[in-house]
Structure formats: C-alpha cells, structure tokens
Image (cartoon, rainbow, N blue to C red):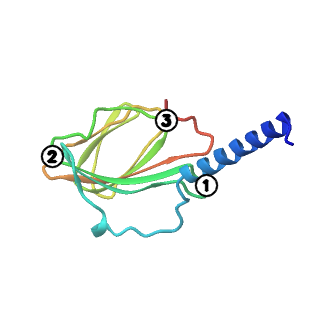
Amino acid sequence: MLSKKDLLVAALTGCSVLSVVALAQSQKPLMGSSAFDWKTIEVKPTKVGARRDFFQSPTATLDELECHVTTVNPGEEPHAPHQHQHEELIIVKEGTIEVVVNGEKKTVGPGSVIFQASNQMHGIRNVGKTPATYHIITWKSPGMPKAK
C-alpha cells in the first residue's frame, strides 16, 4: 500500500517532468547556418510601405536573432522615435534616410550602416524622393533583462 508520502513524491515528480517537457516544447529550435532568398520572402504591406520578415529565432550564442527588411515611402517614417533594451544594426539597401543617432540627425544612403545602442532614442525617416529599403538586425543576449 502506498503511503501519503509516496503519493506526494510521485505527484511532485510527475509535475516536475510535465513542466520540463512543456518548457522544452515551448522553446523555438536553435537556428543553424541558413540562406534566405530575397525573392522567397513574403512582402507584407504596411501603412508607410512594406516589410519582409526573414527570421526571429534563438541561436547557439543568442537568446534571439531577428532580421527584417523595411521599405518606407518618401516622406514617411515607420514609427515615432523610440528606445528599447536590445541593440540593432541597420543596413541601407536603397534610398535616402535620415536617422537620429545620439540626438543628432544624419542623412545616409545605400550601403550605409547604422548602429543603435541599447536604450538610446532613435528614429528613421525617408527623406528621399524614392522608396527607402533597409535591413534591420537585432539580437538579445543571454542574461539581458526581459522587456516588461
């Protein structure tokens, strides 16, 4: 006959196993080496242009690596200036954009690279006469505080 202690230990063990299994199933698999063909990425229209989502996944060294491409119509901005904990790298593919870096506005074009540091205000506006397209790469490092 099982004692109350035996039943309690069995119940706690079962709950622990189920918790670990649920956690493992809820985590995305690690992204390995990959190639993403521009022509196969779905173009999603936005209010100010378009967006292509390439990937958003954990890697062997990062909690999350994300890349998307934004196209902004002339005179538009994708969103108001803002800040966030993660850092981001922006690579201009085409067009002319104005970026806010350390409180200063800078105008850059194709091939330019912008780094936006953690918790610093930043924004982007298309100041050209044609659509501006740029890649945005963000990452979340292990131990980084989670957004609230």
Q: Residues within 10 Å of mark 2 (few under 14, many from 20)?
A: some
Q: Is residue 21 left or right of residue 79?
A: right
Image disc number at residue 74 = 2
How many angstroms separate mark 2 from mark 1 (CA)?
38 Å
Q: Circle 3 is placed at which residue position?
A: 85
Q: Earlier in the sequence, mark 2 or mark 1?
A: 1
Q: Circle 1 is placed at which residue position?
A: 61
Q: Residues within 10 Å of mark 3 (few under 14, many from 20)?
A: some
Kind of element beneath mark 1: loop
Q: Up-down: is 33 above or below 98? A: below
- Residue type indicated by callout 3: Gln
Q: Earlier in the sequence, mark 2 or mark 3?
A: 2
Could you say which quadrant of the image residue 93 lies in?
bottom left
Residue in view at x 17 percent, y 47 percent = 73
Residue in view at x 55 percent, y 59 percent = 30
Q: Is residue 17 left or right of residue 58?
A: right
- Residue type indicated by callout 2: Pro
Tell me, yes or no, whether the two marked residues, 2 and 3, touch with CB atoms within 8 Å: no
